[in-house]
Amino acid sequence: MSTDTEKGLLDGLDPEQRAAVQAPRGPVCVLAGAGTGKTRTITHRIAYLVHTGHVAAGQVLAVTFTNRAAGEMRTRLRALGIDGAQARTFHSAALRQLRYFWPRVVGDAPWELVEGKLRLVGQAAHKVSAPTEVEVLRDLASEIEWAKSSLVAPDDYPEAVRRRRREPPVPATQVVQVYQAYESLKNKAKLLDFEDLLLHTAAVLEDHPHVAEEFRERYRCFVVDEYQDVTPLQQRVLNGWLGSRDDLTVVGDANQTIYSFAGASPRPLLEFTRRYPEASVVRLERDYRSTPQVVTLANQVISAARDRPAGSRLKLVGQRPAGPPPKFSEFDDEPAEAAAVARRIKDLVDAGTPLSEIAVLYRVNAQSETYEQALTELGIPYLVRGGERFFERQEIRQAVVVLRAAAGDPPSGELPDVVRKLLERVGLTAEPPSGGSARERWESLLALVELSEELAATVPEADLGRFVGELEVRAQAQHPPTVEGVTLASLHASKGLEWDAVFLIGLTDGTLPIQFADGDDAAIEEERRLLYVGVTRAREHLWMSWALSRSPGGRRHRRRSRFLYGLIPDDHPTARVPRSAAGPKTNGAKLTCRICGSQLVGTVSIKLGRCADCPSDVDEELLTRLRDWRSTRARELKVPAYVVFTDATLMAIAEQRPTDPAGLVSISGIGASKLDKFGPDVLSLVNNHPHP
């Protein structure tokens, strides 16, 4: 390797990252805290090993746990001049190997991969007279996945759940019956599930020495990312890949183990030096992602954990300039909490924060609905992570067809310009549509243009054919580009991601920690690690909030999460809603009634600007005209009426009778987007209506 190449690979690395990159070939354990640059470190290590001649690029297999992470690793390796190294998920790597060796080992045509278990589990449950409700079938499918990932055979299941204090969805004996019937039906139909990919790969390597020898001749250097989340089944496959060799680099953080329910265990990470006494161990603790304020809070969250193993005691050290302190807020009910979050998001966007750099994170998916409505009311686009896959969208499939057809005789010009011009045929305009599905389609097409810009930046000679190939690889791996919109995601789905602003919502006991974790110390500690993961997703702005009841006027029986004690004082003066620039009167951080001056409580009262008990001066005739107008507009837009304006918003307009745009936007729930779309109509109705 030339001096310039070595310098280029090491420049910009901190001393600990450099130690990991230059560690001798052999077992290396990198304990990497959140935001410490682990992906940069391991990709530079791979490049360093290749450029120094220790291993050929084609002999490297790097595995991680998500297609997105694998795609990012491939992109970074390509930028470092490493094209031949494999970066895949465990399942993708196993599928590739199984397809290659299947004809030689099994002899017949490869069995088909079934992507979802639910249909077969339903048939199995029906066969053994087990419950067949969809919710139960989902739980049974998850239980079978856990058992197979944990290397628990059907007959061993009852003892395994008893020993691990795991609560099965139905009696353990019934799970066994469904598990056995499921395996029988699947094998009879010559189908494989995702766990089978790993089980069969491990079996081939263990039972067929000539196959194992050929594989080990091909791959000689292994890198495993997120090693704290490895399951016993994945570890078995890794053992089969390695054989007696020890050319293995693992990277992980036991503080981020959040998939124990699926069989993951940090034990292989924590016991790595016991298995490999000569291993090099490097600790990465410099946090380049988050401000010192966020880092300090993250350290406080995890330092309260009980029985932390020595290998998990990483203490992050913030490297960024100071930022705003984390904000804690308490609300009377969930709609009020969601409305406040939406307003704060609007403030951030108005101040220049991109929509795609904002996330609302929650413990369970059911919490998203209130936030979807609150964001919709303010006209803020959002994406629910885990929704329709990017490359399965109709506009993306159409775009790929157009690009592929043009790749044979591509137009001249820079790649991004060529892509943009071609996508005009499927609806990419110079200016975005105002909203709705047309705007979502436009954003998806624009994301393809941005992807072509990314490829052109890393591979200057890339042409349209290379770009189409990149899209096909991403489609196969489901590694989509970023689409503009606020992200709504569960804390589990947020793992591996980061945003400028993060809103952690619904932080009450019974939700985080989740209710069923009570009584199990290990489960409670996993819930704490889940909060730690959420906190460490934030680069600069961090909001943590909770509501004392579910609905307006409901009993305020909830209490803030136990994990928040010690982070904020018990008597912390949490504002019920952020300060508003207009609308109801403000007193400090509280909103007060425009009629009696009392503090407003509840999202409807805040919207109306008066207490529920204070007299209403609504103009009934105007309200009727507003409702008729809303029905007409909703039919034209083919949306539910509340998407135009909610009943409470119409009531507020009919009470306050704003006569200009400033007065209209002072009403909670009316932002710039709705002002542009509906403002002229509403103001015309108000101004042309005689005052009662």
Image (cartoon, rainbow, N blue to C red):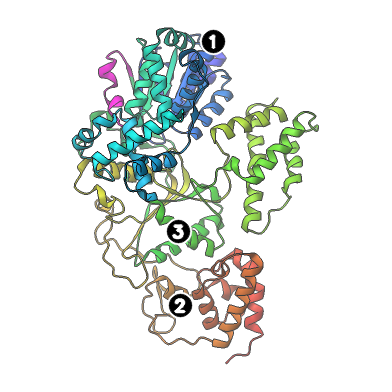
Residue 35, picture quadrant: top left
Would you name the residue on which mark 1 appears? 1
**Label 3 neighbourhood size at 10 Å, few (<14), some (14-19), many (20+)?**
few
Question: What amino acid type is highlighted by mark number 1?
Answer: Met
Question: What amino acid type is highlighted by mark number 2?
Answer: Gly
Identify the residue shown where x is 58% and y is 19%. 83
Question: On residue 392, which mark appears?
Answer: none
Stretch in magenta: 264-280
Residue 434, picture quadrant: bottom right
Would you name the residue on which mark 3 appears? 369
- Closer to the N terminus: mark 3 or mark 1? 1
Identify the residue shown where x is 37% and y is 10%. 245
Separation (CA) of disc 3 from disc 1: 55 Å
Separation (CA) of disc 2 from disc 1: 70 Å
Identify the residue shown where x is 44% and y is 47%. 540
- Residue 278 forms part of the magenta stretch: yes
Q: Quadrant of the C terminus?
A: bottom right
Q: Position of residue 464 (x, y in %)?
A: 72, 30
* Along the viewing direction, whichever of 226 and 233 lies nearer the viewer: 233
Side (left or right) of 120 relative to 406:
left
Question: On residue 609, which mark appears?
Answer: 2
